[in-house]
Amino acid sequence: MPVVICDINNTIIYMNPSAVKRYEKKGGASLVGGSIFSCHNEESNSIIKAVVSWFSENSENNRVFTFHNEKENKDVYMIALRDDNGKLIGYYEKHECRNTETSPRYNMD
């Protein structure tokens, strides 16, 4: 799954290889160091700002469901990243597939 990590200034500080590939048309790895806002429309940027503000209000505010992607059958969440003292230091988007696992349990082949 793609992982894009942002700091509290909304700067992209990390993209895993899956994210680089997924967002290739938007710039891929060159997005690191830039603003997450350059990748979204005005409405999405407002929502991101609201979620980050909510994360900042309380160290218990750590996860927000953002949407369900029908095409890929997955739920998407924004997740707070905190330091050891609970201070907000960033956030990322988490993708959770909804399909049931089909491989045998504890298969180590």
Image (cartoon, helix red, strand yellow):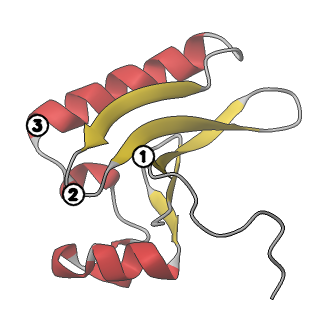
Q: Is residue 13 left or right of residue 39?
A: right
Which of pointers 3 and 1 lies earlier in the amino acid sequence?
Answer: 1
Q: Is residue 22 above or below residue 41?
A: below
Residue at 62% from the left image edge and 25% from the top image edge: 62
* Residue located beneath label 2 in the image: 39
Q: Position of residue 13 (x, y in %)?
A: 53, 64
C-alpha gap between disc 3 and disc 2: 10 Å
Residue 24 position, x and y percent, is 25, 81
Q: Determine the residue located farthest toward the right in the rendered image.
A: 84
Measured Cα–Cα span from mark 2 to mark 1: 11 Å
| Whether residue 40 is situated above or below residue 46 in the rendered picture | below
Check contact, mark 3 vs mark 1: CB within 8 A. Answer: no
**Residue that badge 3 annotates:** 42
Label 1 CA crowd tier, 10 Å (few <14, some 14–19, many 20+): some
Q: Is residue 108 above or below residue 93?
A: below
Quadrant for the C terminus in the image: bottom right
Pointers 3 and 2 in contact (C-beta within 8 Å): no
- Residue that badge 1 annotates: 10
Indicate the position of residue 81 as horizontal and vertical percent values: 66, 40
Task: Tell me which residue sits at (44%, 60%) in the image.
Answer: 12
10 Å neighbourhood of mark 3: few (<14), some, or many (≥20)? few
Q: How far from the left and from the top, in percent, is residue 14?
A: 54, 68
Residue visible at 49% across and 82% down in the picture: 17
